[in-house]
Image: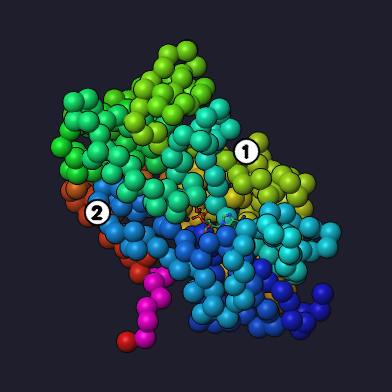
Amino acid sequence: MQINDVRDVVLVGGGHSHIQVLDAFAVTPPSACRLTLVVDRPIAVYSGMVPGFVAGQYRAEELEIDAAALGRRAGAEVVLERAVRIDVANRRIELEHGDSVPYDIAAFDIGSTVAGLDIPGVREHALPTRPIGAFVGRVAALLEAARRHDAGTPFRVVVVGGGAGGVELAFTLDQRLKDDTSGPIEVVLLEAGSQVLSGYSDSLVRRVTRRAAERGIAIRCNCGVTAAGPDVITLADGNPIPYHALIWVAGAVSHPIFRESGLPTDDRGFVRIRSTLQFEQHDALFATGDCGTLIDHPSSAKAGVYAVRQGPFITDNIRALLTGAPLRSYTPQREFLTLLNLGDGTALGTKWGRTIDGRWVMKLKDWIDRRFMRRFQIRPPG
Ligand SMILES: Cc1cc2nc3c(=O)[nH]c(=O)nc-3n(C[C@H](O)[C@H](O)[C@H](O)COP(=O)(O)OP(=O)(O)OC[C@H]3O[C@@H](n4cnc5c(N)ncnc54)[C@H](O)[C@@H]3O)c2cc1C
């Protein structure tokens, strides 16, 4: 590869890092580069505001980032198709319908999917949180089902997965259903492990447990789900739990693309990457966000905050690889501020083992989220 040749740079996925690359490349285009954006859908949905959407605090449009428009503004050719395989030997990204896109440098920011979709009945009957845009599109039908429900018995929503996303959805759904429907509501949060919010501080777990009890949200731990039917799930101990709506938010696993390309992955299928964000054995391939697992920090959470922080690094490192400059090393922050929207106008925040609570915490979350979104809104002229 000659430094002055025109090189094909392909960005696959419109996640939190790539929208920053596109934003930066629109301002200062990299020289000698033909840019292509491959996205399975033109609009990326910002997950941080999804619980707020569920609570009725945001409209669907307020969560949307037009990744395809950002791509076109950056001068990229936009390919609206799902990437399914990487042909490393021939440097091509293979697409769902048989075409392929050549690359000299390719970067992946394709996020993750939800664990447990292969459990019998889950794919058919549950409402999974991934793809997140599809989840957002199905919330209205859930609310309508609750409104139509016979008010003589509680409308029961079971949320499976007690991570941060599951906790937020349990609280925000509880609030929205109480606001929007007249009958009784029951929200049950199921967690397979021994407590919710594994890996978070004890003070946050205590606060969530207390607020759930005050709101009448049932939290049940050590409850692995083994099967789902149209209106009942079965737990590992054989006990059934009837439901009217089943939300599936049982942790992150990788899309199959990396394993199917024969690349080194971690045990959840996420591609292994170095601190430069390059694949373990391939200098021309990068990954950011959920889809890459840092070899030196394998237990970093799959959270959007990391994908956001990696944005400037991947931007600089693509430029560096194009010009032959040295690449930057990324180290994930050890702690980050987690903010959980409880749907009632309050939020919980936690960092360094301490937990904060209240309306001002929700205002802070709203300010952070809206500020992030404003950076990527492409508005018509005038
Ligand atoms: C309900 C909920 C709330 C959450 N709240 C927070 C929060 O407050 N803070 C936080 O830090 N994390 C939060 N998370 C986690 C967060 O959503 C993820 O960590 C984050 O979205 C990962 O960002 P990403 O850039 O890796 O990918 P994503 O944001 O998921 O983007 C992936 C992009 O790639 C595209 N794509 C996917 N597959 C392909 C393919 N094969 N080919 C082409 N394009 C593809 C998608 O359409 C999308 O544009 C939440 C998760 C959930 C479910």
Q: Give coordinates of residue 132: x percent, y percent.
A: 45, 50
Which SS class for mark 1? loop
Q: Give coordinates of residue 354: x percent, y percent.
A: 30, 39
Is residue 378 a member of the stretch shown in magenta? yes
Q: Nearer the viewer, residue 190 or 317?
A: 190
Query: Does residue 289 appear left or right of residue 187 in this picture?
Result: right
- How busy is the neighbourhood of tag 2: few (under 14 within 10 Å), some, or many (20 plus)? some
Residue at the image point whose x is 50% and y is 16% from the top? 236
Q: Which residue is mark 1?
A: 268
164 is higher (above) or lower (below) than 71: above
Name the disc covering residue 83, or none. none
Give the quarter of the figure containing the N terminus: bottom right
Residue 349 found in image quarter = top left
Q: Which residues are magenta?
A: 375-381
Residue at the image point whose x is 84% and y is 59% from the top? 89
Which SS class for mark 2? loop
